[in-house]
């Protein structure tokens, strides 16, 4: 290197710096592209979870309306429609449970798992059992007991679930 002329040393130094600059620039461009993909994936994941939460909330409102519909159809002596509503109720519970499990699977926080299991999934199972009891009372023509069950137990269960969903 000592034998090289000063001009050649300057050109080699400049070339070396240019090569380093190009390598660093290429790495930066590649990482910025990867960062954009990661942000996009995160946004899609978060948006999906928000969608699931909103859908669970809507389905929960639908459950309350369906329960009231079963009672109303019982009072109207329309047991065929009450049966349709009861089948819809069971399908809605299963959809809510499936979406709740999907939310659980998307997080690694054990506290979220526990809350979702004990405060939502288990309570939806209890809600389905109480609704089945109400439906059987309606089918048997015991509408007074069905009304009392709705007022005394089903509404309380709904309120408990709704409070947990808002937390």
Image (cartoon, rainbow, N blue to C red):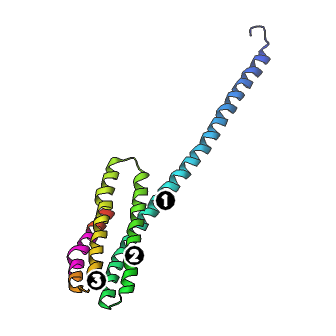
Residue shown at the point (42%, 66%) measured from the top left: 95
**Where does the image place residue 87, in percent across and percent down from the top left?**
39, 75
Q: Name the image quarter holding residue 34.
A: top right
Q: Position of residue 97 (x, y in %)?
A: 38, 62
Residue at left 43%, top 67%? Answer: 55
Q: Depth check: give the residue in front, 75 or 55.
A: 75
Residue 166 shows in this picture:
no
Q: In this view, does 75 lie to the left or right of 33?
A: left
Q: Which type of secondary structure does the marked residue at label 2 adopt? A: helix
Asked whether, in this view, residue 25 is left or right of residue 103, the answer is right
The spot of residue 142 in percent (x, y) is 23, 85
Camera-near label (3 vs 1) is 3
State the image quarter where residue 150 is shown.
bottom left
- On the question of residue 133 being in view, the answer is yes
Q: Distance between the residues labelled 3 and 1?
A: 38 Å
Q: How far apart are marks 2 and 3 (CA)?
A: 14 Å
Residue bearing the label numbered 3: 138
Q: Name the residue under label 1.
A: 48
Residue 57 is a magenta residue: no
Q: Earlier in the sequence, mark 1 or mark 2?
A: 1
Pinpoint residue 21: horizontal percent, then vertical percent.
67, 31
Disc 1 secondary structure class: helix
Q: Looking at the image, which is closer to me, 44 or 13?
A: 44
Q: Which residue occupies 23% across, 82% down?
A: 147
Q: Tell me how far mark 1 sits from mark 2, CA to CA.
A: 27 Å
Residue closest to the eye, 101 or 88: 88
- The reply to whether the C-beta atoms of the residues labelled 3 and 1 are less than 8 Å apart is no
Residue matched to label 2: 87
């Amino acid at each position: 290197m000592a034998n090289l002329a000063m001009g050649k040393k300057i050109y080699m130094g400049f070339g070396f710096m240019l090569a380093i600059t190009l390598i660093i620039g290429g790495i930066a461009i590649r990482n910025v592209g990867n960062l954009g993909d990661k942000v996009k994936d995160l946004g899609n994941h978060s948006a999906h979870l928000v969608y699931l939460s909103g859908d669970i909330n809507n389905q929960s409102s639908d459950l309350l309306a369906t329960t009231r519909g079963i009672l109303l159809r019982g009072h109207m002596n329309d047991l065929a429609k009450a049966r349709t509503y009861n089948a819809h109720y069971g399908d809605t519970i299963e959809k809510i449970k499936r979406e709740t499990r999907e939310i659980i699977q998307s997080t690694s926080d054990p506290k979220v798992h526990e809350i979702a299991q004990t405060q939502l999934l288990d309570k939806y199972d209890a809600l389905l059992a109480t609704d089945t009891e109400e439906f059987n009372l309606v089918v048997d023509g015991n509408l007074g007991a069905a009304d009392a069950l709705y007022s005394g137990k089903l509404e309380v269960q709904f309120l408990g679930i709704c409070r947990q969903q808002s937390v």
